[in-house]
Image (cartoon, helix red, strand yellow):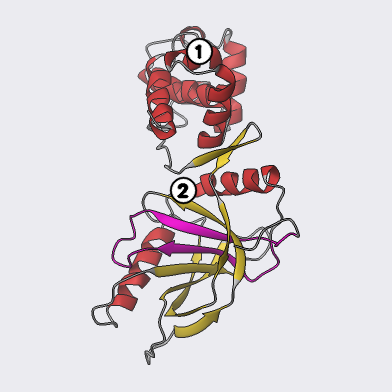
Amino acid sequence: MDHNEVIERALIHIEDHLQQSLTVESVANTFNMSKYYFHRLFSAMMSCSLNQYILSRRLNASLTFIQNKNSSLTDIAYQLNFGTQASFTRAFKRQYGVAPSSLKTGLTTISPVTIPTVVKRPIKNINGDIVTDFTLTEFKETRISGIAFEVDLANDDYKEKIRAHSEMLLSHIDEINGPCYVIYSNCQPDSTRFKVLFGIPSSIEIDKPYFFTVDVPQIFCARFNYCGEILDIGDVLENDYARFLKIAKQETAETDIELIQAFDDVHHLDSTYHIYAPIKKLPTDSDL
């Protein structure tokens, strides 16, 4: 099994044993792995510790028990290994912001969520720390023609907005194939709004509003590889990037460009893609 399959199977194992005692050692033993390596792997892949994940899934399971109204809160706490009703209530309020009793009375409704999807990406081991695999590389100077717009990553429709603009661009270009880029820039501090350019490496002129041709300068970057629906990685990328900066002892670069997402095929935006994150080129970084 590769590491993606290990974690996928671990999530199913945890879900099937929420009413039993679960520890790092017991879950790791299921996959004949060292508890120390498994814990580092799980934390890197899921952006949280195993114990935090188990707690969140037990609280998620409690929603069904509560809303069925067949068990008392004390019974639910016991069934899901919380020890006492008080500890269960405290954990529930931390996660959901309301007391479980409000669900009992019908004042609040919270729907359970399915097992999270494991975002598939390669990993590497650096001096005992597991981090998403990266390559220090130059994003070469590239002329890109495309359509500009804004997205707010806090809104659920941002993926559809990107896809709609990509289709708008393709409708103005005949028989285009090859790579494409989604360039995110000019995000203000503590903001989730980005200026976006969706484009192809070409020099074309389209006499329509919001169509531009720009020269993206050469940028030193950390490159990561992901697989899945376009930008369907949410907090995973943020966590991966933070771990990379800490473990690789790198610093972010001061540039208007925040991220560059590169696809090999402009017609397949659900394929494997690269994320280029600008970083400072330190004296110890070799020229690549």
The kind of residue on which mark 1 rests is Leu
User: Which quarter of the rendered picture does the N terminus lie within?
Assistant: top left
**In this figure, which residue is indicated by the disc labeled 2?**
233
Position above or below: 36 against 160: above
**In this figure, which residue is indicated by the disc labeled 1?**
22
Nearer to me, 61 or 27: 27
Q: Is residue 250 left or right of residue 163?
A: right
Q: Residue at x 40, y 37 (%)?
A: 117
Position above or below: 250 against 268: above
Q: Is residue 98 left or right of residue 204?
A: right
Nearer to me, 34 or 163: 34
Q: Is residue 90 magenta?
A: no
| Magenta residue span | 253-282
Q: Is residue 99 visible?
A: no
The kind of residue on which mark 2 rests is Ile
Q: Position of residue 235 (x, y in %)?
A: 54, 46
Asked which secondary structure carries label 2, the reply is: loop
| Disc with the residue nearer the chain's start (2 vs 1) | 1
Q: Position of residue 122 (x, y in %)?
A: 47, 42
